[in-house]
Image (cartoon, rainbow, N blue to C red):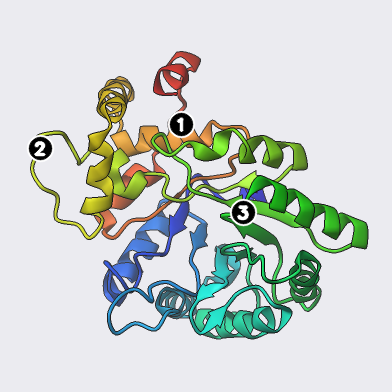
Amino acid sequence: MTSELGPVVLGGNVFGWTANKDESFAVLDAFVAAGGRSIDTADVYSAWVPGNAGGDSEEIIGEWVASRGNRDSVHIATKVSSLEARPGLSAANLAAAVDDSLRRLQTDYIDLYYAHNDDKDVAQEEYVAAFDALVKAGKVRAVGASNFEADRVRSAVEIAKAQGLTPFTFAQDRWSLVERGIETGLVPTLAELGITELPYSSLASGFLSGKYRAGGPAVDSPRAGGASRYLEVPANIELLSTLDDVATAHGADVASVALAWLRAQDVVGAPIASARTVAQVPALMNVIELTAEELAALS
């Protein structure tokens, strides 16, 4: 499946939040026109927005797919466990939540269904079996773990293997040039288990797009606070300078370089990145190959 993901997975967290329906449709159209194939969302997107109840992103994606008639040519991933109305990973909740997501997405199958977070109140045997049941029912084609600790990914996979059930084959975690905590424990585990990582926050809330600079103008974005905090770390300011140099050498955007670094990591299938405007799509889709020296300098 990894070869079918394309160079980047389009993050759907902005749909129904910083991008309204028409803007979201335009971004999705531009993404597919540029060769994009994979879209990531979750049932909880975007419940944090006043007036939203969650499922807003799924609904927009579902309406877009239905209007374009392109379901079989796009890969859709969504997640379960974080929505207040459908919390956790119990078998009963998974069965109810998947049907909610299918209805909102206007489809009869989900390409990749993630546990959005681990649920230590539910036995792993229960939710591993419940995910497998969704696969056997044809509602889900592959399953993944998001924000799991390495030992919990391993034990879930061991349970699935021992019982002949569908294992986690994908993972989704926070990973970027400025968020590298998963590299010491989780990444080696994923490599050992043959699990494909699809990192989120790959541009660190926009910081790695290069638009946030020390002493630079304020950026009008709901994510500005989260992105600006990276400027408090001197090493990150030095990193921006290195990114600038590499981007100039390739005639590319800083964001394209940051995504290329992630794409070069052995366990990564494709980074996840979002765009709230059509103008932001080309930088996501510009695939460049970094030299060993450039990778080392960035790392």
Sequence order check: which comes first, mark 1 or mark 3? 3
Farthest front residue in view: 121
**Along the viewing direction, whichever of 170 and 179 lies nearer the viewer:** 179
How far apart, in angstroms, are the residues tagged by discs 3 and 2? 36 Å
Q: Nearer the viewer, residue 154 or 9?
A: 154
Q: Earlier in the sequence, mark 2 or mark 1?
A: 2
Image position of 214 (left or right of 251): left
| Residue named by callout 2 | 216
Q: Amino acid at mark 1?
A: Trp
Q: Quadrant of residue 15?
A: bottom left
Q: Position of residue 114 (x, y in %)?
A: 61, 64
Position of 173 with respect to 196 (left or right) is left
Front disc: 3 or 2: 3
- Mark 1 residue crowding within 10 angstroms, few (<14) / some (14–19) / many (20+): many
Quick one: label 3, few (<14), some, or many (20+) residues within 10 Å?
Answer: some
Image spot of residue 60 (x, y percent): 40, 77
Pointer 3 or 2: first along the chain: 3
Tell whether label 3 touches label 1 (CB within 8 Å).
no
- Residue under the point 56% across and 65% down: 76
Please, is residue 266 above or below residue 114 in the view? above
Where is residue 8 shown, x and y percent of the image? 48, 48
Q: Are marks 2 and 1 in contact (CB under 8 Å)?
A: no
Residue shown at the point (91%, 62%) measured from the top left: 163
Q: Which mark is residue 148?
A: 3
- Asked whether, in this view, residue 18 is left or right of residue 297, the answer is left
Q: Nearer the viewer, residue 192 or 259?
A: 192
Would you name the residue on which mark 1 appears? 261
